[in-house]
Image (tube, rainbow, N blue to C red):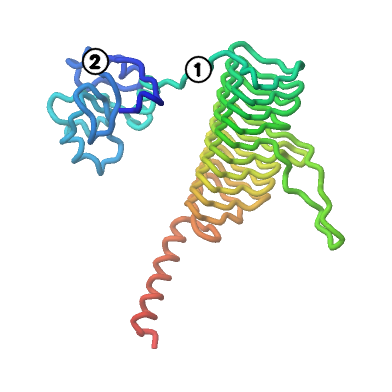
Amino acid sequence: MADPRFFQKVGPFSISDLARIGECEVGTPDSEDRVIQDTATLGDATADQVSFLDNRKYVPMLSQSGAGACVMKPGDAIHAPDGMALLLSPAPYRSFALITQAFYPTPGPVPAVHQSAVVDDSAVLGDGCQIDAGAVIGAGVKLGDGVHVGANAVLTGNVTVGARTRIGPNASLEFCDIGADVQIHAGVRIGTRGFGFAMDPRGHVELPQLGRVVIGDHVEIGANSTVDRGMGPDTKIGAGTKIDNLVQIAHNVVIGKNCVLAAMTGVAGSAELEDFVIVGAQVGIAGHIKLGAGTQVAGKSGVAKSTERGARIAGIPAVAHRDWIKQNIILDRMTKKRKDGSDG
């Protein structure tokens, strides 16, 4: 059970309620009125809690679970113990996420401007905004309804932020336009100067970075990540994209809709990621290349070339995933031969 000091729970919900919320079908019709109080893992759940099964390696745990209800694929229902209410879904993890959101909704802002916050007279704050202690809202900033600006966050001149966006403590936003329902976590830097110089033996000459950062709706940017503003064209992040902690997005980068970038990834200047690209942790993506829609990049890869739509790549330099597996098999065999002395 979530610690009530930090997470406020609502409910309870009936099985029929959970089916509607989680986009499921009830697999046990006689259980529709059963009341569920909370969510839990398969191993910890009790009779008044709902759990889920998505990875089939946990099927043995399902049969032993004390959960009162469980979300699962229809084909796994035969493994459920007697008396368990079944919520059948083609995507159990998604359904369980929706159900958990219902039990633990994100708290809305508490409309107020803290007395230690600094808000320029020319800034425009929408209805119901919360501005926490020490925050700075610069000249010409426009905040939509229900925006929450965390403690000591700084929004410089003329930044715009869409409705219901949450900006974490100590974040800084400049030269940017942010969409609605965006989550910007603690320490994020958006709109900082792009890393651009005219390199010269007489000394490197700074090239003014005159673009913006434009971020679409429902984007999430993890703690201490950075997004540089464009050099002339804008840096863009498409709607629904999720960016983990400690990610660097360089100037002029264009990221499409619903992409996922895991922690410690770096995307160099003017690279383009089309829609639904998935990037594992600690990946480096070279500048001026394009990753086609749906490309999947394995963790720790170094991507130096453009990819076609739906590519799966891995390695340094990154190659097709199947080729990377073959390379590692061959290298392993060569290494074993040397150790055995069979190469003479």
Query: With respect to residue 95, does 332 lie above or below?
Result: below
Q: Residue at the spot x=58%, y=53% of the render? A: 284
Q: Which mark is residue 97?
A: none
* Left or right position of 225 against 7: right
Q: Nearer the viewer, residue 273 or 119?
A: 119
Question: Mark 2 sits on what residue?
Answer: 35
Q: Residue at the spot x=18%, y=41% of the render? A: 60
Q: Would you identify the image quadrant in which residue 183 lies?
A: top right
**Sequence-wise, which precedes: disc 2 or disc 1?**
2
Q: Position of residue 22 (x, y in %)?
A: 35, 22
Q: Tag 1: residue type?
A: Gly
Question: Mark 1 sits on what residue?
Answer: 108
SS class of the residue under badge 2? strand
Q: Residue at the spot x=59%, y=37% of the render? A: 187
| 3D distance between C-alphas at marks 2 and 1 | 26 Å
Residue projecting furthest to the right: 202
* Left or right position of 136 against 70: right
Name the quarter where the C terminus is drawn: bottom left
Query: With respect to residue 241, does 20 lie above or below?
Result: above
Q: Residue at the spot x=57%, y=54% of the render? A: 303
